[in-house]
Image (spheres, grey):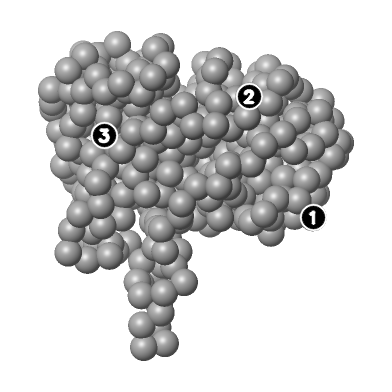
C-alpha cells in the first residue's frame, strides 16, 4: 500500500486519516488487452525472501554481480545472478530500510531505532548503533562518512568504521506526513535530504551545517491531506543537477552545487523521477506517467491508462520504459509515445520496486517477498 499516513493527531478517538486501509484509496484503472504487443516479458527465476508489506525502503542492492536484499522480519540475503543463495543471516531485527553498501559493509535501518552493519562478503555482523527513532530511509555513505535519517527528523553523520557519532542535525517534522522518505544522497561536498515538509536540504559533510535549502512544493489545499508535501520519491542525480519530486504536486531540477533552480513543473508524486536520453519520466499522484523533455520540462506524452494502480518508479530499459503496479503486473511502455506494448504478472501482490539486476537483467521485489529476475525481448516482426 502506498502513502501510509503517520500522525499523532486524533479526532473523536479515531485516526485523522484512513489511508492505511489495505485497499487502494481510489478505484484503480481496469487493465485493457494489448492489441499488438511489441515485446515479451520473460521471467528467469523467482525466490521467496520473506514478507515486506508496504516497506518500500527495503530494496535490492546489486553490486559485484551479487544481489543483497533484506525482509521486514530481519533476514538478509546475498544471491547470485542465477538466483542461488550465497549466504543468509538472521539479524533478529525489525528491518525498515536498506541495504546500502558503504565501504564493504551493508548498512540497514531498524524500525525499533538503530542500524546494523554487516560484512558484504559473508553477512557477519560488524557493529550496531542505536538511533533516536526508527529508520525507514535508505542510508548513504562512503569510506569517510555514513549518513542516516531517523523518523524523528534527525540526520545522523557517523563514522562508517564503527558507527560512532560525528554530528546530528534535527529537522522539522510536520504533525502529519506520508510515511516514506527519499533515500539520502551523498555528493562530494554535501548530504542531500528530502524532507517531509516539502524541502530539499544540502548539509555539509564536515559538520552537518546547512549549505542550501530549496522549497520543492508549498503546502496548500483545503484538507490536511491536500497540504502534505513530502519529498518521498528517490532523488535523481544526473550530472551536475538533482531532481526532486514532492507529493504536493511539484518537481524541481536544481544544481547540486548551490541549489539554484534550473526549471520546475507542476507535477508531483510518491515515487522519484527517472531519466534516459529521450525522457525524464515522472509518475504523478494519480499514476499518470509523463515523458518530459529533460532540458526544459516540456511534456512529450502522458499515459493515463494505469491510473491509481500505485506504480513503482519508471525504469528505462532497452529503448522502452517499465513500471509495475499494486497487483503484481509489470507494464512496458513505448518511450516514443507512451503506449503500453507488453504486460506480465511478476508477483501475486504489489510490486514494491523494480530496477536493474546483474547480467543485463531487471529485478522486481514484491510486497509478498517475491524477488524475480526478468527481461524483455522484442517479438518477431515488431517494430522494436
Residue occupying image coordinates x 81% and y 44%: 128
- Across and down, in percent, residue 184 comes to 53, 34
**Going by the image, does 203 lie left or right of 231?**
right
- Across and down, in percent, residue 256 comes to 41, 19
As drawn, 100 above or below 174: above
Residue 204 visible in the snapshot: yes
Q: Is mark 2 on a helix, strand or loop?
A: loop
Q: Residue 206 carries which label?
A: 2
Within 10 angstroms of label 1, few (less than 14), some, or many (20 or more) residues?
few
- Gap between marks 1 and 2, in whole Å? 33 Å
Task: Give the mark nearest the N terminus, 3 or 1.
Answer: 1
Residue lying farthest to the bottom in this orientation: 12
Q: What element carries label 1?
A: loop
What residue is shown with label 1? 92
Given residues 3 and 376, the one toward you in this image is 3
What residue is shown with label 3? 251
Within 10 angstroms of label 2, few (less than 14), some, or many (20 or more) residues?
some
Q: What element carries label 3?
A: strand
Amino acid at each position: 500500500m502506498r502513502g501510509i499516513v503517520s500522525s499523532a493527531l486524533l479526532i473523536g478517538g479515531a485516526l485523522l486519516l484512513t489511508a492505511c486501509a489495505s485497499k487502494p484509496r481510489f478505484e484503480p484503472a481496469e487493465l485493457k488487452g494489448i492489441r499488438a504487443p511489441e515485446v515479451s516479458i520473460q521471467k528467469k527465476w523467482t525466490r521467496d525472501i520473506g514478507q515486506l508489506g508496504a516497506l518500500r525502503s527495503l530494496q535490492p542492492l546489486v553490486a559485484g554481480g551479487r544481489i543483497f536484499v533484506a525482509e521486514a522480519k530481519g533476514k538478509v540475503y546475498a544471491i547470485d545472478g542465477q538466483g542461488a543463495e550465497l549466504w543468509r543471516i538472521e539479524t533478529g531485527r525489525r528491518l525498515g530500510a536498506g541495504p546500502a553498501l558503504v565501504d564493504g559493509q551493508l548498512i540497514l535501518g531498524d524500525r525499533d531505532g538503530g542500524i546494523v552493519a554487516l560484512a558484504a562478503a559473508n553477512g557477519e555482523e560488524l557493529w550496531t548503533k542505536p538511533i533516536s527513532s526508527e529508520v525507514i530511509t535508505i542510508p548513504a555513505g562512503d569510506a569517510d562518512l555514513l549518513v542516516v535519517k531517523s523518523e524523528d527528523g534527525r540526520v545522523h553523520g557517523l563514522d562508517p568504521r564503527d558507527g560512532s557519532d560525528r554530528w546530528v542535525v534535527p529537522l522539522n517534522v510536520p504533525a502529519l506526513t506520508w510515511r516514506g522518505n527519499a533515500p539520502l544522497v551523498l555528493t562530494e561536498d554535501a548530504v542531500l535530504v528530502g524532507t517531509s515538509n516539502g524541502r530539499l536540504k544540502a548539509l555539509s559533510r564536515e559538520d552537518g551545517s546547512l549549505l542550501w535549502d530549496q522549497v520543492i512544493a508549498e503546502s496548500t489545499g483545503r484538507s490536511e491531506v491536500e497540504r502534505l508535501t513530502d519529498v518521498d520519491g528517490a532523488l535523481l542525480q544526473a550530472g551536475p543537477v538533482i531532481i526532486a519530486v514532492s507529493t504536493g504536486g511539484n518537481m524541481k531540477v536544481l544544481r547540486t552545487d548551490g541549489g539554484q533552480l534550473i526549471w520546475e513543473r507542476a507535477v508531483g508524486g510518491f515515487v522519484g523521477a527517472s531519466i534516459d536520453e529521450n525522457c525524464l519520466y515522472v509518475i504523478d499522484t494519480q499514476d499518470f506517467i509523463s515523458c518530459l523533455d529533460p532540458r526544459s520540462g516540456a511534456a512529450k506524452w502522458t499515459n493515463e491508462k494505469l491510473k491509481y494502480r500505485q506504480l513503482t518508479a519508471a525504469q528505462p530499459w532497452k529503448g522502452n520504459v517499465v513500471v509495475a503496479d499494486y497487483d503484481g503486473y509489470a507494464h512496458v511502455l513505448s518511450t516514443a509515445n507512451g503506449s503500453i506494448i507488453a504486460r506480465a504478472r511478476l508477483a501475486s501482490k504489489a510490486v514494491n520496486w523494480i530496477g536493474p539486476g546483474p547480467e543485463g537483467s531487471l529485478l522486481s521485489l514484491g510486497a509478498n517477498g517475491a524477488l524475480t529476475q526478468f527481461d524483455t525481448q522484442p517479438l518477431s516482426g515488431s517494430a522494436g
